[in-house]
Every structure is written in C-alpha cells, then in structure tokens.
Image (tube, grey):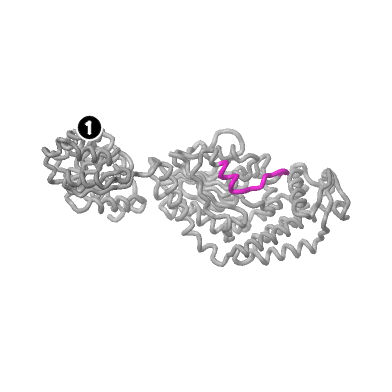
Amino acid sequence: MDSVPPLVLALRGLAERPALIGPDGRPVSGAALLTGTVPADALSQALAARVRAARAATREEDPQEQRLRYWASVLGPSPIRHTVLLPPAGLGVELALATLLAGGTVVCGDPDRPPADLLAELARSRSTHLSLPSELLWRMSESADLPTEDLGELRRVLHIGPEPRQQDVYAAVEALGAVVAHVREPCSDAEASGTALREVVTAATDAAWKQLIGVTTDQVRAFTERLDAAVLASMLLALRRDGVFAEPGRGHPLAEVLRAARVAPAHHRLVERWLEELTARGLTARHGDLFRAERRVDTSDVARAWRSAADAWTGSLGSATVIDHLRSSAERLPALLSGEERAVSLLLPKGSLRVVEALAARTAAGRYRATVLGAALRRIAAGHRGPGPLRVLEVGAGVGTATDAVLRALAAAGRPGTGAEYLCTDPSDLLLAAVRARVGRHPRLGFELFDPHRPGPGPAAGPFDVVVSDGVLGSAADPDPAARRLAGLLAPGGWLLLTEPVRTRLEFLVSGAFLPRLPPGDARTGPGAPAPGAARWRTALARAGLRTVSAVTGDDHPVTLLGDQLFAARAGV
C-alpha cells in the first residue's frame, strides 16, 4: 500500500463522491477521475493527465508530492470545495491536485466570464475556497452584483500576481468576507529553468564533496606542475634521435625531426603540436623553420621527473596504476610515433580492463565526476514526467567512467527498467566493446557507434531528455558546430551534462592522442590549437541556444585544476 502514490489513494477514498465539478456543473467522481472519464475542458484534462502519470509511478518517483502537500496545508482543513479560475497549467493544476489530495472537490471555472457570472457560480457551488489571478479578484470585489450573492461558505481566497497594494487587499477582504492570501506570480520559463538547474547542481555537489576529502588545491597544483615537466621531458627525449636535438644551439627543420624520430604520417600533426608546447615552455626554441633544443635531457632526467610526479599523485589523488600507465606510454613514445606499437595495447594490456578500471574509477577526480553525474541523473530522473521513459544518451563513452556512474544512479532511482532508456555511444568500436565488457548487461541499455564531429543524422532513438558528453567541444576544431550538434540531440527542456578541458593536458598528448577514436582534425592534437577554457565553451553553448549553463566545479576546484571542468546546461522548453 505504501507504494501507491497519495494522490491515487485520495481519489480512491473519494470513490463515488465528487472530485471534480465540470464547467457544465456535472460532478465527476473520484473513481471516474482515476479512469480518465472527465469533461473536455482544459483543467479537467490536465488533472486527468497528472492522475494518469501518478498511477503509472511509484510513490518514490513523485518529487511533486511535497509541493502538493504544502499547497494542501495552505488550503487548510476539510471540507474543501475549491473553485479554480487559474490557467490549466502550472500553479492552477497544482492547487487543484492539492485539493484532491486533501479529499476535497475541484470546481472548474472559466476566468473569461464576466465577474457577475463568476460570483453567481461561486455562490451556487457553495465553494469554500477560490483561487484566481489578482487582477480578476480586484474586479470581482468591485462588482455591483456582489451584495446580491450569498458567499457565506467562502473561507479562503488565493490570488496570484504581483505584490498587491494594501488597499486592494482590504477591499477584497471586506467585500468577500474571507481570508485573502497572496501567492507570488509564477516565475518565467527561464527563471524556472535556472532554478531547476541550480537545484540539480546543488544536489550533485552535495553528494560528491566527500570524494575529495584530503585533496587540496596546493597538492593538485604541485602534481600538475610535476606531471607537465615529466611529459615535456619525455617528448623531447622521444624526438632526440639520430643527432636531432643532441647539440644545444643546432637547429633542425621539421622534416628532419619527423624523419629522425621515424614518425608515421598519421602522427605528423601531433609532433608539430609537441614542438609548439616544448617551445612555449622553454625546452626548445624556434628560429624561422628551424627548431633547436634549449635543454639537454637524458633517460635519468626523465625517470627522475616521473618519480617526482608519481610521488605527488599516488595516494589521495589516485591509484598508482594510473600514473604507471602514463609513464609506460611515455616510455614507449618512439614505438607509438612510428606505429610499431598501438596505444590500445597499453590501455588494454593482453585484453585486461585493469587500466581502464583504474582510469575510470580509481582517481579522486574520476570518483568526484562519477558521483556528480550520478546524483544529477537521480535528481533529473525523479522529476521526469514523461510521457515516455527517460531517454539518456552518452556521447563519447571513452573508458566508461560516465557510463558506469549513470547506470548506477539510474538503478538507484529505480531505473533503468520501464522508466529509462540509455544509449551509450563512441566513435571507436574497440572502446565501445571495452565499455560493454565493463558495465555488463542492463535493461534498456544499448550501444551504438556515433561520432558527433562527422556529418549525418544522430542516433535514431533521439531526441533525448539527457545527454552526457565528455570532451566533445574540446576535441572539435570549432566548438560552435559541436555545441549545435549537442543541442540538436536534446528534447525541449532536456539536460546536458558535460565535461570539458580547461587546461592543456600534456599527458593526453603522450597517451590518449594515439588512440583510434579521435575525430579528424581533433583540436587537441594539431598545431595552432586554441587554449581550452570555460569562456569558450559557454560562448559556444549560448550560440547553440543553451543559455542556461552552470559550472558544477569552480575555477579553483581541485577537479578543474586537474584539467577538466564540469558543466550542466538545459534546453528551452
């Protein structure tokens, strides 16, 4: 019995007694409202739709119950016979539902009728409660027909609108002889969307803060400095072949650098990017078309730099497996550059998911992001009102960090199942297979190859209520088309939860940059890449029509300092 929503229980309690009085004066019983047998007017139909949704839900799935109970308490004790003269949406529907929840009867009125007719109907219905726009209340209070109507049953009037003048309130109280209460005019769609977004972000961060206990901004800054130093030294050492960069002061053209390091054509642009970073950070210098080493590095320098980075990482920031994977990738750079070794073999050694699991779940930042995504999805799923199941799309599953977090969250919220459909996508069939092996089977879970950077239709199951995206804007040569693509995947009122880079992640340039999933012209792997940053992503999202954007992690947040910032955005209704 506890699993039955209270609204359904209240209507069952009314049974054959009137729950609703239609505009034609005919009563509709609680039992009839449960079956959807109601008049054709908009308010009756809106109530029937909400009752249908309540019948299909469990009590745990109805986040509106608390609001309805609040409005029921505002209405006060029984008996309640409530004339509703509000638009058949939003607050008008909520007040009518609260009346039903309290065991009362809703009288459907027509606010477009003259005040004299409305007063006569109010008297005939013997209403105890009245809710209406403030402007209509002032007109009814001034009606010449008011003294002729018996409104002795009327106890409480709720008027909705801007802050009223005291003289108008006094006049209404004297004219109607009832308690008059003001309700602030409902906020605009934009305000409501912003409020909902803030609530989701707050719920997410409240759930995730424990994942960063023991992690400080100073610690993160020290680690990223040491990691960058180790990566840069590894880059320079990998290019120091056949006399190139062996003598300080001697310049080398790009073609010589590529030839000496035996760089495969597929990685030429990546090496150009390396040289940009090495030059910007003082390890090399460029004079015209020639590059020269400004500092000599050897294997002992590189090994020492990686030990320093590992000391700053291992422990509170994450598993040693993560830093070992990055160091192993850096040690194999010559073979990766030539194409003799594939990065996938380092990510999935002998087919093992050990490294994938560590990258996905065994870092403080990864656990924080996973908890944020999970809590956000639980909040969004709880507020989903259909008509169909919650449709979730993940764009760029990668190693499955978000996939696992979101599936766990939906399971905790009673979904997936009949309440949600989840589509996991990635441009790489190899990584998609790895994610499938990692997360296993779930009801209504699908997998599909999808590259948001390539032209063509999106997944056929769209549009989606929630899109979870990892690095789609940051990997695009131009973030504007990518943002429009993401926005186009959203249903009206849909949610976008995205992770984007806000720091140049040098470690990516010696590991993930070699994976086969990258889009053509990936902005992170070629020369001339613009610096990543929150302002770029916000601008692109705004141009795509997603103007309600909130940063989940601030600029000085440890997760942001590690390289990625979390954002939440919502499409217009």
Q: Position of residue 158 (x, y in %)?
A: 25, 46
Q: Is residue 197 left or right of residue 285?
A: left
The one of 212 and 445 positioned closer to us in this rendering = 212
Q: Is residue 392 visible?
A: no
Q: Position of residue 241 (x, y in %)?
A: 84, 52
Q: On the rendered image, what quadrant is the N terminus found in?
A: bottom left
The question of residue 531 being in magenta is answered with yes
Asked whether residue 273 is drawn in magenta, I would say no
For the residue labelled by badge 1, is the local secondary structure a helix, a strand or a loop?
loop
Quarter placement of the C terminus: top left
Q: Position of residue 436 (x, y in %)?
A: 55, 49
Answer few, some or many: residues within 10 Å of disc 1's Cα (few below 14, many 20 plus, some between 14 and 19).
Answer: few
Q: Nearer the viewer, residue 271 or 426?
A: 271
Give the extent of the magenta segment.
526-540
Residue shown at the point (53%, 45%) measured from the top left: 394
Q: Residue furthest front?
A: 167
Count of numbered circles in the view? 1
Identify the residue at horizontal 19%, vertical 38% (top origin).
Answer: 142
Expressed as whole percent of the image width and height from the top left, the position of residue 291 reads 83, 48
Q: Is residue 524 left or right of residue 484?
A: right
Q: Amino acid at mark 1?
A: Arg
Left or right of 317: which side holds 155? left
Say if residue 412 shows up in the picture: yes
Reading the image, the residue beneath label 1 is 113
Could you say which quadrant of the image residue 472 lies in?
top right
Residue at image location 54% in from the left, 44% down from the top: 447
